[in-house]
Amino acid sequence: MDLTDSQGQADRRADQLRRKGKDLLVQGQSEPAFACFDEAFALAPERLIHRLNAAAAHRARGRAEAVLPLLRPLAPRFRSSLQPAGSDPSGDPSSDPSGDPALLPVFWRHLADAESQAGEPCDAARCWLELVRLEPSAERIEDVLQALGGWLDQRRHHRQWPDAADLLLNGLRDLQPHQPWIQGLQPDSPLLRLRIRPERHGEAPLIHALHRQGFPDRRDARQVDVLRAAGQLSLSLVAELEGELVGHVAFSPASLLPPAPGVPDPCGIQGLALAPLSVREPLRRQGIASRLVAAGLAAARDRGWAWVVLIGGLHFYGRFGFGPASAFGLRDAYGFGEECLAMELQPGSLPPGGGLVRYSPLLGL
Ligand SMILES: CC(C)(COP(=O)(O)OP(=O)(O)OC[C@H]1O[C@@H](n2cnc3c(N)ncnc32)[C@H](O)[C@@H]1OP(=O)(O)O)[C@@H](O)C(=O)NCCC(=O)NCCS
């Protein structure tokens, strides 16, 4: 048997062990699962998936210090992976024996966490930037800012934190030159401590007051109360700054009716309607609404919702991926026409035949 044969055998065995480990994890048998991941890594250490599994196993066992030696050596090789062709031939992910470029975001996320825990904030910042470079969506930027905010809170007195915040924010500005709110972020800005989180019990009156300021006719503030009371507040996120609620966004269920008699009924397909959205007056035009929307879309996608519709301007919502609902063949029963916008959270989730958008009747449009 030649060397390639025995390598192939080791690879196959490592893959078997990985599958077995995943099954064991599903059954709640974590320690035997981790043992499988360790063994798979020992058999095929050059495969990124095995290295990531072994790193995740170390973290789950509380051995954070064992993660860095596994992942750090690969960073220089992947760091340049997105540079223009020819600028660094060693960085081409397709020439990487460890394979799958889809694993790279997972790699950077694991390494960023490990560098943060090890007290290496500048290295963590570089990892987060690689993550945003790979996945330059508003949602990913929000993830990174939340991570930075949490980490600044914990490590305010660490000597490197101002350097790390500078590094991260300068990098984000370079990556997102057309986003004014990112251009405006400064390392000393209190907005770096903005938290986007789910509404908590007892916050209903504060949220009501926020929307009353945003929409003086009271209707939108009431809608949130009514949706909540009816159990139709599918997602309710607040922006908290230094202990105060400064913004809120709500999502409620939406569905589609068939576009015409005889066309298959897309009614089973469920999405969300985004409304209302408000930010407290003196804090507007600093990106708070943008962060609420980005975090809301990420949470909706994580929870398996398929699409989102809203009534609003393309100028603001276009940056998150919304387009005219009409481009998806969707019609809006309320006559908002081009102001009705839609976005797929799961690609291909809106039916090709289109449909009539139906918001929750409680939304009172
Ligand atoms: C609409 C509303 C939610 C926006 O909140 P916000 O926090 O100001 O929103 P953002 O800061 O994310 O974005 C608003 C604008 O400020 C810009 N901006 C953000 N940060 C900036 C900065 N640092 N410097 C300059 N401009 C900035 C954004 O790019 C955006 O610009 P645009 O006019 O090109 O769209 C807020 O004005 C509000 O509560 N209005 C009343 C309620 C309402 O009308 N809701 C509408 C829901 S569709």
Image (tube, rainbow, N blue to C red):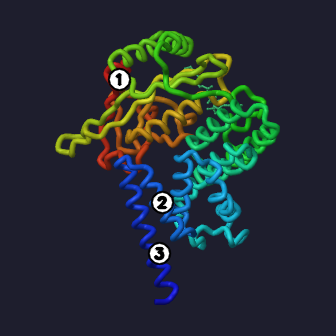
User: Marks 1/3: CA distance?
Assistant: 52 Å
Labelled pair 2, 1 in contact (Cβ < 8 Å) = no
Q: Is residue 210 above or below residue 287?
A: above
Q: Nearer the viewer, mark 2 or mark 1?
A: 2
**SS state under label 1:** loop
User: Looking at the rendering, in which quadrant would you find the C terminus?
Assistant: top left
Closer to the chain start, of discs 2 and 1, is 2
Q: Quadrant of residue 167?
A: top right
Tell me the residue that label 1 is attached to: 232
User: Marks 2/1: CA distance?
Assistant: 42 Å
**Does the residue tagged 1 have its C-beta within 8 Å of any atom of ligand 1?**
no
Q: Nearer the viewer, residue 267 or 163?
A: 163
User: Marks 3/2: CA distance?
Assistant: 14 Å
Q: Which mark is residue 37?
A: 2
Q: Quadrant of ligand 1?
A: top right
Residue 257: x and y in percent read 26, 36
**SS state under label 3:** helix
How packed is label 3: few (under 14 Cα within 10 Å), some, or many (20 or more)? Answer: some
Q: Residue at x 32, y 37 (%)?
A: 270
Q: Residue at x 47, y 75 (%)?
A: 10
**SS state under label 2:** helix
